[in-house]
Amino acid sequence: MTAILLIKRNVKLFFKDKGMFFTSLVTPGILLILYATFLGNIYRDNFTGALPEGFSLSGGIVDGLVGAQLISSILSVSCVTVAFCSNFLMVQDKANGTIKDFRISPVRPGILAMGYYAATLLSTLLICFAAAGICLGYVAFAGWYLSLKDVCLLFLDVALLVFFGVALSSLINFFLSTQGQISAVGTIISAGYGFICGAYMPISSFGEGLQKALSFLPGTYGTSLIRNHTMRGVLAEIRAQGVPASVTEELGNALDCNIYFFDHKVEILEMYGILAAAAAILLAVYILLNALRKNVH
Protein backbone atom coordinates (compact mmCIF):
# COMPACT_ATOMS: atom_id res chain seq x y z
CA MET A 1 0.00 0.00 0.00
CA THR A 2 2.82 2.40 0.87
CA ALA A 3 4.53 1.71 -2.43
CA ILE A 4 1.31 2.45 -4.35
CA LEU A 5 0.89 5.76 -2.51
CA LEU A 6 4.48 6.72 -3.30
CA ILE A 7 4.02 5.85 -6.96
CA LYS A 8 0.82 7.91 -7.18
CA ARG A 9 2.52 10.82 -5.46
CA ASN A 10 5.54 10.76 -7.77
CA VAL A 11 3.49 10.38 -10.97
CA LYS A 12 1.19 13.21 -9.92
CA LEU A 13 4.12 15.52 -9.17
CA PHE A 14 5.80 14.68 -12.47
CA PHE A 15 2.76 15.60 -14.54
CA LYS A 16 2.12 18.63 -12.35
CA ASP A 17 5.63 19.95 -12.99
CA LYS A 18 5.14 21.52 -16.41
CA GLY A 19 8.89 21.89 -16.94
CA MET A 20 9.70 18.19 -16.51
CA PHE A 21 6.60 16.98 -18.33
CA PHE A 22 6.82 19.16 -21.42
CA THR A 23 10.59 18.69 -21.69
CA SER A 24 10.05 14.94 -21.74
CA LEU A 25 7.08 15.15 -24.10
CA VAL A 26 8.46 17.49 -26.77
CA THR A 27 11.89 15.88 -27.05
CA PRO A 28 10.79 13.05 -29.43
CA GLY A 29 8.75 15.47 -31.53
CA ILE A 30 11.63 17.91 -31.88
CA LEU A 31 13.98 15.08 -32.82
CA LEU A 32 11.56 13.86 -35.48
CA ILE A 33 11.37 17.30 -37.07
CA LEU A 34 15.14 17.82 -36.94
CA TYR A 35 15.92 14.35 -38.29
CA ALA A 36 13.39 14.58 -41.12
CA THR A 37 14.56 18.08 -42.05
CA PHE A 38 18.32 17.73 -41.89
CA LEU A 39 19.14 14.03 -42.13
CA GLY A 40 16.52 12.68 -44.51
CA ASN A 41 18.34 13.68 -47.70
CA ILE A 42 21.67 12.44 -46.34
CA TYR A 43 20.19 9.02 -45.56
CA ARG A 44 18.51 8.93 -48.97
CA ASP A 45 21.77 9.66 -50.82
CA ASN A 46 23.62 7.02 -48.79
CA PHE A 47 21.04 4.35 -49.61
CA THR A 48 20.94 5.02 -53.33
CA GLY A 49 24.73 5.22 -53.49
CA ALA A 50 25.07 1.81 -51.83
CA LEU A 51 23.08 0.02 -54.52
CA PRO A 52 24.97 -1.95 -57.20
CA GLU A 53 25.37 -0.32 -60.58
CA GLY A 54 22.33 -0.95 -62.75
CA PHE A 55 19.91 -1.33 -59.82
CA SER A 56 17.41 1.31 -58.86
CA LEU A 57 14.59 1.48 -56.36
CA SER A 58 11.32 3.34 -56.44
CA GLY A 59 11.10 6.55 -54.48
CA GLY A 60 8.53 4.98 -52.17
CA ILE A 61 10.90 2.22 -51.06
CA VAL A 62 13.75 4.65 -50.46
CA ASP A 63 11.43 6.94 -48.49
CA GLY A 64 10.26 3.96 -46.45
CA LEU A 65 13.85 3.01 -45.65
CA VAL A 66 14.72 6.58 -44.71
CA GLY A 67 11.62 6.82 -42.50
CA ALA A 68 12.44 3.54 -40.78
CA GLN A 69 15.97 4.70 -39.95
CA LEU A 70 14.73 8.06 -38.72
CA ILE A 71 12.17 6.67 -36.30
CA SER A 72 14.51 3.94 -35.05
CA SER A 73 17.09 6.60 -34.20
CA ILE A 74 14.52 8.81 -32.46
CA LEU A 75 12.99 6.04 -30.37
CA SER A 76 16.30 4.49 -29.33
CA VAL A 77 17.44 7.88 -27.98
CA SER A 78 14.12 8.99 -26.49
CA CYS A 79 13.63 5.86 -24.39
CA VAL A 80 16.73 6.78 -22.38
CA THR A 81 16.76 10.59 -22.46
CA VAL A 82 13.07 10.79 -21.51
CA ALA A 83 13.77 8.39 -18.63
CA PHE A 84 16.36 10.81 -17.25
CA CYS A 85 13.92 13.74 -17.54
CA SER A 86 11.17 11.76 -15.84
CA ASN A 87 13.50 10.65 -13.06
CA PHE A 88 14.68 14.11 -12.02
CA LEU A 89 11.95 14.21 -9.35
CA MET A 90 14.11 11.93 -7.21
CA VAL A 91 16.95 14.46 -7.29
CA GLN A 92 14.59 17.39 -6.71
CA ASP A 93 13.33 15.71 -3.55
CA LYS A 94 16.93 15.63 -2.32
CA ALA A 95 17.59 19.22 -3.34
CA ASN A 96 14.53 20.63 -1.55
CA GLY A 97 14.86 18.39 1.51
CA THR A 98 11.69 16.34 0.95
CA ILE A 99 13.71 13.14 1.02
CA LYS A 100 14.62 13.78 4.68
CA ASP A 101 10.97 13.51 5.65
CA PHE A 102 10.74 10.15 3.91
CA ARG A 103 13.94 8.92 5.56
CA ILE A 104 12.65 9.56 9.08
CA SER A 105 9.32 7.91 8.30
CA PRO A 106 8.67 4.14 8.65
CA VAL A 107 9.04 3.74 4.87
CA ARG A 108 11.82 1.28 4.11
CA PRO A 109 14.58 2.52 1.77
CA GLY A 110 13.91 -0.27 -0.73
CA ILE A 111 10.21 0.65 -0.94
CA LEU A 112 11.11 4.32 -1.37
CA ALA A 113 13.53 3.43 -4.17
CA MET A 114 10.95 1.29 -5.95
CA GLY A 115 8.40 4.09 -5.62
CA TYR A 116 10.64 6.40 -7.62
CA TYR A 117 11.53 3.69 -10.13
CA ALA A 118 7.95 2.54 -10.77
CA ALA A 119 6.62 6.10 -11.09
CA THR A 120 9.38 7.02 -13.53
CA LEU A 121 8.74 3.82 -15.47
CA LEU A 122 5.02 4.56 -15.86
CA SER A 123 5.61 8.17 -16.91
CA THR A 124 8.35 7.26 -19.39
CA LEU A 125 6.36 4.40 -20.92
CA LEU A 126 3.40 6.70 -21.47
CA ILE A 127 5.52 9.33 -23.21
CA CYS A 128 7.57 6.86 -25.27
CA PHE A 129 4.51 4.90 -26.43
CA ALA A 130 2.98 8.20 -27.51
CA ALA A 131 6.22 9.01 -29.33
CA ALA A 132 6.15 5.61 -31.02
CA GLY A 133 2.61 6.31 -32.20
CA ILE A 134 3.72 9.65 -33.67
CA CYS A 135 6.68 7.97 -35.37
CA LEU A 136 4.44 5.30 -36.89
CA GLY A 137 2.21 8.07 -38.21
CA TYR A 138 5.25 9.60 -39.90
CA VAL A 139 6.19 6.23 -41.43
CA ALA A 140 2.64 5.79 -42.72
CA PHE A 141 3.09 9.08 -44.53
CA ALA A 142 6.67 8.38 -45.74
CA GLY A 143 6.26 4.73 -46.73
CA TRP A 144 4.69 1.88 -44.74
CA TYR A 145 6.33 -1.56 -44.95
CA LEU A 146 5.69 -2.74 -41.39
CA SER A 147 3.73 -5.87 -40.56
CA LEU A 148 1.54 -6.18 -37.47
CA LYS A 149 4.24 -8.39 -35.95
CA ASP A 150 6.86 -5.72 -36.55
CA VAL A 151 4.69 -3.08 -34.87
CA CYS A 152 4.09 -5.31 -31.82
CA LEU A 153 7.79 -6.12 -31.54
CA LEU A 154 8.63 -2.43 -31.90
CA PHE A 155 6.48 -1.60 -28.86
CA LEU A 156 8.14 -4.48 -27.00
CA ASP A 157 11.56 -3.02 -27.90
CA VAL A 158 10.48 0.41 -26.67
CA ALA A 159 9.19 -1.04 -23.39
CA LEU A 160 12.38 -3.02 -22.75
CA LEU A 161 14.61 -0.06 -23.61
CA VAL A 162 12.56 2.12 -21.25
CA PHE A 163 13.11 -0.44 -18.47
CA PHE A 164 16.83 -0.16 -19.15
CA GLY A 165 16.76 3.64 -19.38
CA VAL A 166 14.86 4.06 -16.12
CA ALA A 167 17.18 1.64 -14.31
CA LEU A 168 20.24 3.49 -15.66
CA SER A 169 18.86 6.92 -14.76
CA SER A 170 17.84 5.72 -11.29
CA LEU A 171 21.33 4.46 -10.57
CA ILE A 172 23.03 7.63 -11.83
CA ASN A 173 20.54 9.97 -10.16
CA PHE A 174 21.12 8.16 -6.86
CA PHE A 175 24.44 10.01 -6.62
CA LEU A 176 23.00 13.45 -7.54
CA SER A 177 21.62 15.94 -5.04
CA THR A 178 21.49 19.45 -6.59
CA GLN A 179 19.74 21.23 -9.43
CA GLY A 180 23.11 22.01 -11.02
CA GLN A 181 23.98 18.34 -11.15
CA ILE A 182 20.60 17.62 -12.76
CA SER A 183 21.30 20.13 -15.52
CA ALA A 184 24.82 18.85 -16.11
CA VAL A 185 23.82 15.19 -16.33
CA GLY A 186 20.80 15.98 -18.49
CA THR A 187 22.98 17.89 -20.95
CA ILE A 188 25.60 15.14 -21.10
CA ILE A 189 23.04 12.39 -21.64
CA SER A 190 21.11 14.33 -24.27
CA ALA A 191 24.26 15.17 -26.21
CA GLY A 192 26.22 11.97 -25.81
CA TYR A 193 23.91 8.98 -25.58
CA GLY A 194 22.77 9.17 -29.20
CA PHE A 195 26.36 8.76 -30.38
CA ILE A 196 27.40 5.89 -28.14
CA CYS A 197 24.23 3.88 -28.85
CA GLY A 198 24.57 4.29 -32.64
CA ALA A 199 21.44 6.40 -33.11
CA TYR A 200 23.00 9.54 -34.59
CA MET A 201 25.64 7.69 -36.60
CA PRO A 202 25.65 3.91 -37.23
CA ILE A 203 28.29 2.14 -35.19
CA SER A 204 29.47 0.50 -38.41
CA SER A 205 30.78 3.91 -39.52
CA PHE A 206 33.15 4.12 -36.53
CA GLY A 207 36.65 2.70 -36.33
CA GLU A 208 37.13 -0.97 -35.53
CA GLY A 209 38.40 -0.30 -32.01
CA LEU A 210 35.45 1.93 -31.14
CA GLN A 211 33.02 -0.60 -32.63
CA LYS A 212 34.39 -3.29 -30.32
CA ALA A 213 34.21 -0.97 -27.31
CA LEU A 214 30.60 0.01 -28.03
CA SER A 215 29.64 -3.65 -28.43
CA PHE A 216 29.97 -3.93 -24.64
CA LEU A 217 27.24 -1.31 -24.08
CA PRO A 218 23.64 -2.59 -23.70
CA GLY A 219 22.19 0.49 -25.42
CA THR A 220 23.85 -0.62 -28.65
CA TYR A 221 21.61 -3.69 -28.73
CA GLY A 222 18.50 -1.68 -27.90
CA THR A 223 19.11 0.49 -30.95
CA SER A 224 19.72 -2.58 -33.11
CA LEU A 225 16.48 -4.22 -31.96
CA ILE A 226 14.45 -1.18 -32.94
CA ARG A 227 16.29 -0.91 -36.26
CA ASN A 228 15.57 -4.56 -37.04
CA HIS A 229 11.85 -4.25 -36.43
CA THR A 230 11.39 -0.95 -38.25
CA MET A 231 13.48 -1.99 -41.28
CA ARG A 232 12.74 -5.68 -41.73
CA GLY A 233 9.73 -5.12 -43.98
CA VAL A 234 11.37 -2.58 -46.28
CA LEU A 235 14.56 -4.65 -46.58
CA ALA A 236 12.42 -7.64 -47.56
CA GLU A 237 10.74 -5.48 -50.21
CA ILE A 238 14.15 -4.41 -51.52
CA ARG A 239 15.12 -8.08 -51.93
CA ALA A 240 11.83 -8.69 -53.71
CA GLN A 241 12.76 -5.94 -56.18
CA GLY A 242 15.73 -8.04 -57.32
CA VAL A 243 18.55 -6.56 -55.24
CA PRO A 244 20.96 -9.41 -54.31
CA ALA A 245 20.74 -10.76 -50.78
CA SER A 246 24.43 -9.97 -50.29
CA VAL A 247 23.70 -6.30 -50.91
CA THR A 248 20.83 -6.16 -48.42
CA GLU A 249 23.02 -8.01 -45.92
CA GLU A 250 25.69 -5.33 -46.29
CA LEU A 251 22.99 -2.69 -45.98
CA GLY A 252 21.88 -4.32 -42.73
CA ASN A 253 25.48 -4.23 -41.51
CA ALA A 254 25.80 -0.56 -42.43
CA LEU A 255 22.55 0.35 -40.62
CA ASP A 256 23.38 -1.64 -37.45
CA CYS A 257 20.59 -4.13 -38.00
CA ASN A 258 23.43 -6.62 -37.68
CA ILE A 259 25.62 -6.13 -34.62
CA TYR A 260 28.83 -8.06 -34.06
CA PHE A 261 30.51 -8.78 -30.75
CA PHE A 262 34.02 -9.08 -32.12
CA ASP A 263 33.45 -11.74 -34.82
CA HIS A 264 30.19 -13.10 -33.44
CA LYS A 265 26.95 -11.88 -35.01
CA VAL A 266 24.56 -11.19 -32.14
CA GLU A 267 21.14 -12.70 -32.78
CA ILE A 268 17.84 -11.02 -31.91
CA LEU A 269 17.12 -13.22 -28.89
CA GLU A 270 20.62 -12.56 -27.59
CA MET A 271 20.01 -8.82 -27.89
CA TYR A 272 16.83 -9.17 -25.83
CA GLY A 273 18.74 -11.18 -23.23
CA ILE A 274 21.57 -8.64 -22.98
CA LEU A 275 19.23 -5.67 -22.62
CA ALA A 276 16.97 -7.40 -20.09
CA ALA A 277 19.93 -8.60 -18.02
CA ALA A 278 21.48 -5.13 -18.01
CA ALA A 279 18.20 -3.55 -16.86
CA ALA A 280 17.82 -6.16 -14.09
CA ILE A 281 21.39 -5.71 -12.86
CA LEU A 282 21.17 -1.91 -12.82
CA LEU A 283 17.86 -2.05 -10.95
CA ALA A 284 19.23 -4.52 -8.41
CA VAL A 285 22.29 -2.34 -7.75
CA TYR A 286 20.08 0.75 -7.39
CA ILE A 287 17.81 -0.95 -4.84
CA LEU A 288 20.79 -2.37 -2.96
CA LEU A 289 22.46 1.03 -2.70
CA ASN A 290 19.26 2.54 -1.31
CA ALA A 291 18.88 -0.30 1.18
CA LEU A 292 22.46 0.02 2.43
CA ARG A 293 22.73 3.80 2.52
CA LYS A 294 21.35 5.35 5.68
CA ASN A 295 21.67 8.98 4.74
CA VAL A 296 20.68 10.33 1.34
CA HIS A 297 22.22 13.74 0.72
Image (spheres, helix red, strand yellow):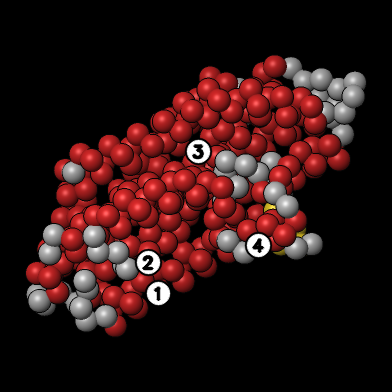
Element at label 2: helix
Q: Quadrant of residue 108?
A: bottom left
Q: Is residue 162 left or right of residue 266?
A: left
Q: Are marks 4 and 3 in contact (CB under 8 Å)?
A: no
Q: Which residue carries the number 2 mark?
A: 171
Of discs 4 and 2, which sits in the foreground? 4
Q: Which residue is mark 4?
A: 213
**Height in image: 6 above or below 31?**
below
The answer to which of marks 2 and 3 sits earlier in the sequence is: 3
Give the amino acid at mark 3.
Ile
Q: Which mark is residue 74?
A: 3
Badge 3: few (under 14), some or many (20 or more) residues near its Cα, within 10 Å?
many
Residue 118, horizontal then vertical, whole percent: 30, 59
Camera-side mark, 4 or 1: 4
Q: Amino acid at mark 1?
A: Val
Residue 124 in percent (x, y) is at 35, 48
Q: How many numbered marks, from 0 up? A: 4
Q: Are marks 1 and 2 in contact (CB under 8 Å)?
A: yes
- Res. 209 visible in picture: yes
Q: CA distance from mark 4 to mark 1?
A: 23 Å
Q: Is residue 1 something one can see in this rendering?
A: no
Residue identified by numbered label 1: 285
Q: Quadrant of the image for the C terminus?
A: bottom left
Q: CA distance from mark 4 to mark 3?
A: 23 Å
Q: Disc 4 to disc 2, how far (Cα)? A: 22 Å
Residues packed near mark 2 inside 10 Å, few (<14), some (14 to 19) or many (20 plus): many
Residue 26, quarter of the rendered image: top left
Q: Is 56 situated left or right of 22 in this image?
A: right
Q: For this rendering, which residue is in front, 144 or 13? A: 13
Mark 3 element type? helix
Q: How crowded is the residue under tag 4: few (<14 C-alpha within 10 Å), some, or many (20+)?
A: few
